[in-house]
Each structure stands twice: as C-alpha cells, then as structure tokens.
Amino acid sequence: MGKRKGPRVPYDLIGSRETGAVAIVEVPEGMDPEEAAREVMSRHPHVKSVLLKAGAREGEFRVRPLKLLAGSEETEVIHKEHGYRIKLDPRRVYFSPRESTERQLVAESVRDGELVLVMFAGAGPYAIAIAKRRRAQVVGIELNPIAVRYFQENVILNRVGHLVFPIEGDVAYVTPAMYGRFDRVVMPLPKGAYAFIGYALRALRGGKGVIHFYYWGGDEALSEAEEMFRKEAASIGLEATSIGYRIVSSYAPKVYKMRVDFLVRPLNVE
Ligand SMILES: C[S@@+](CC[C@H](N)C(=O)[O-])C[C@H]1O[C@@H](n2cnc3c(N)ncnc32)[C@H](O)[C@@H]1O
C-alpha cells in the first residue's frame, strides 16, 4: 500500500476495515493539520485515529515519532495483508504497510523445508509472510520488547506456532548460538544491517545459502553492498555472489532503500 491518490494529503493506512485502522499523514506546508485529519477520516470511516509524522524514524527500534491529530488515543490495530494479520501499535513498533509486496517477494523465494533466520524481525511480518507461504521454519530475532510481544501474539493470531519462533534479543548476542543452522537469512535493517554481515554469513549451514540484505544508499549502493559481502565472506573462507537486487523505495533523487540477494558458498568449491 503506497501513498493514496484522492485527498490532497498523502497518507498510509495501517489496520483493517473489520478492526479499525490508523492513518499516518504527512501534512504539506501551509495545510491545516486538523483539516487534513478530517479529510482522511471522512474518506475512511474505519479510521479511528489520525497520526501526524512528527519526525524521522529514530533510535535502535526505528520507531517514528507520531502525533495524534484526531480520533482515539488507542492506536493498536490489526493490519491485514496477503492472507495474514499483523497486530501492532505504530507508535511503539516499526511497521510499513508499503512493504507488503517486498515481504511477498522474499516469502516466494523461500523453498519448502528451509530453515530461515529473520534478523531484526519487528512485529513479525517477514517471518509470518514466509510461514504462510511455504512449509519453512522461521526463527525471528528482535530487540524491541514491545515488538517481540506483538510478534508472539501474531504467531498465535496466524496459527503458525509450529513454524515460527520469536526470540527477544540483540542479533549480535543471539545469532552465535545458532551458527551453522540456516538455509537463508533475511536482514531487514537498511540503515544498519551492514554491521551484522559476519553474523549472517556464519549463520548459514555449511557456509551455503542465501542472504537477503537490505541497504540504504545512492547510485553506488549495489557495488558497496557487493564489496562488503565479498570482503566479509572471503575473510572466513566463503564466497558471496549477488544474484539479484530490488529497489524497495526511493526517498530522494538517487537515495534508495534496496534489497540485494547473495548466494553464499564455501570458497574454491565447484
Ligand atoms: C527496519 S525495522 C524492521 C522490522 C520488521 N522486520 C518489519 O519489516 O516490519 C528493524 C527492526 O530491527 C530491530 N533491531 C535493531 N537493532 C537490532 C539488533 N541489534 N538486534 C535485534 N533487533 C534489532 C528494531 O527494533 C526494529 O524493530
């Protein structure tokens, strides 16, 4: 779900018709925020709260400051996409409804029977998207305790408790105990995942597998990502080859959030 056409104010909706939704608005210069909120609420009767983007995403938890413009203080919702539900409060945990296609693309690339590690798992959308799409087991690691609580609830809500295992903690501390176990690693932390490449490589079983790496940068982003993986992999006797990439979103001319997919293998193995 991207920015919607119609009203003059750009906004995202998180939630559903059945359980209510919140609208997250960007009010253009010169527009009255109250008027913007009324416009969105009149267009979508199921919107119970309108929240104004009051700054950039911040801190380790990547949560954006959001100011209540209109409606209920209670901003917890259940978001529906592609046949699964994600319960969350956008004021307390990261979530982007615009990335639903991205989650599906990653989920589709997983094969039945794989063991997948989702680092930086948030309220669990990648892990649940994968388990709903494939017969794969997924471990998700997340630092924000509120996001972990939602992640656990979402596992139950989507009946994937036999497939998805949330772990609360820092990827840097939790992953080493699971080195050598996974067929695939997802790294959805565009502004910081590069610091965890070594953990992802060591998490692969027999040094073989696929890593979906998210990165933020300009025209050089792809070659920067390739170079970081090449160096880190070589330092531990592995080879990481990029097998595809996707621009997930662009923020300004030539500033992208992108996913780069790497195939990893032991060095010098035919
Ligand atoms: C960009 S958000 C993505 C969340 C989720 N995957 C999604 O797509 O909705 C990154 C998440 O990583 C978590 N995080 C940041 N640093 C972490 C770390 N060192 N270990 C585990 N989680 C971390 C944040 O709390 C945040 O929820």
Image: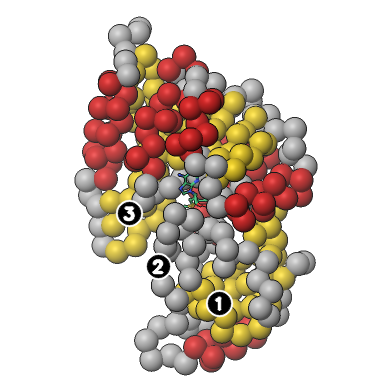
The x, y position of residue 198, in whole percent, is: 37, 30
Horizontally, residue 193 falls left or right of residue 158, namely: left
Disc 2, SS: loop
Which numbered disc, 3 or 1, marks the residue closer to the eye? 1
Residue placed at 40% from the left, 67% from the top?
56
Residue 4 in view here: no
The x, y position of residue 142, in whole percent, is: 55, 45
- Quadrant, the N terminus: bottom right
Mark identifier at residue 51 = 1
Q: Give the crowd class for mark 1: few <14, some 14-19, many >=20 residues within 10 Å.
A: many
Which of pointers 2 and 1 lies earlier in the amino acid sequence? 1
Please, what is the three-letter code of the amino acid marked with disc 1?
Leu
Residue placed at 43% from the left, 30% from the top?
200
Query: Label 3: which residue?
Result: 256
Please, what is the three-letter code of the amino acid marked with disc 2?
Ala
Does residue 137 lie above or below 66 as drawn?
Answer: above
The x, y position of residue 181, in whole percent, is: 54, 21
The x, y position of residue 165, in whole percent, is: 66, 36
Residue placed at 53% from the left, 26% from the top?
177
Horizontally, residue 103 falls left or right of residue 57, namely: right
* Residue 245, quarter of picture: top left
* Residue 156, quarter of picture: top right
Callouts 3 and 1 close, C-beta under 8 Å: no
Structural distance between the alpha carbons of marks 2 and 1: 14 Å
Report the front residue among 181 and 171.
171
Structural distance between the alpha carbons of marks 2 and 3: 16 Å
Query: Label 2: which residue?
Result: 56
